[in-house]
Image: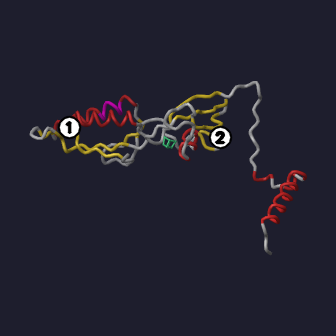
Amino acid sequence: MELNRRDFLKMSGACVGATVAFPFLSDTTIWAAPKEFPLKKKVKETSTICCYCSVGCGAIVNAYEDGIIKIEGNPDHPINEGTLCPKGLAMSQVHQVDGELNPFRLTKPLYRAPNSTDWEEKSWDWMLDTIAQRVKSTRDQNWNAKANRTDAIASLGGGELDNEECYLLAKMNRALGVVYLEHCARL
Ligand code: SF4
């Protein structure tokens, strides 16, 4: 059947009219029912920074007593001005999945000793002291005084580090004489 512009407009108008007159004809099963909130209880809004990449977008977390309702871009943030990419929009899943606390989220540092196959829970103090001691002893044992550097340590930054953290990490590594610096984002 051939459809000219006038026919198309007529058919479109008829469809819209039918939907307005008979709303039960439209498929309502595709819409999720909104959660009900008592109006006198306040939804708490907190501003935060996206945890995923070094762009460092600002977000607003809307939370109710039983968890996060939604996370949206912060319109007052100078970097993203209200936008978030799909990763940032899914940030609430770090904390909870389907309304339950995310069972895979790590909340304590895990340590695997050399040649061991088991992970042990350690405190942050133990972990930071151990890392500092091992960096210092590795640097001292492998110091190249002629070149003023060590080739025994490499530093790999993560995409979740923001600009300021990357700056401090690079500065600390240069001060230690570490020359192999890499970052997954390569921004
Ligand atoms: S992951 Fe997306 S929302 Fe998060 S900081 Fe990076 S660009 Fe922004």
In percent of width and height, residue 159 lies at 41, 44
Circle 1 residues within 10 Å: few <14, some 14–19, many ≥20: some
Q: Image point 84% across, 57% down: which residue? A: 13
Q: Residue 115 carries which label?
A: none
Ligand 1 under 8 Å from disc 1 Cβ: no
The x, y position of residue 4, in whole percent, is 78, 68
Q: Earlier in the sequence, mark 2 or mark 1?
A: 2
Work out whether residue 65 or residue 162 is closer to the camera in this orientation and state it.
162
Tell me, yes or no, whether the highlighted magenta stretch contains residue 164.
no
Residue located at (56% from left, 38% from top): 95
User: Alpha-carbon neighbours of circle 2 within 10 Å: few (<14), some, or many (≥20)?
Assistant: few
Residue at disc 1, secondary structure: loop
59 to the left or right of 123: right
- Kind of residue sitting beneath label 2: Gly
Relative to residue 12, is residue 124 depicted above or below?
Answer: above
Extent of the magenta region? 126-131
> Residue 81: x percent and y percent?
54, 36
Q: Name the residue under label 2.
A: 99
**Location of the N terminus (image quadrant):** bottom right
Q: In which quarter of the image is residue 108?
A: top left
- Residue position for label 1: 177
- For badge 1, the amino acid type reads Gly
Closest to the camera, between mark 2 and mark 1, is: 1
Up-down relation of residue 32 to residue 168 (above or below): below
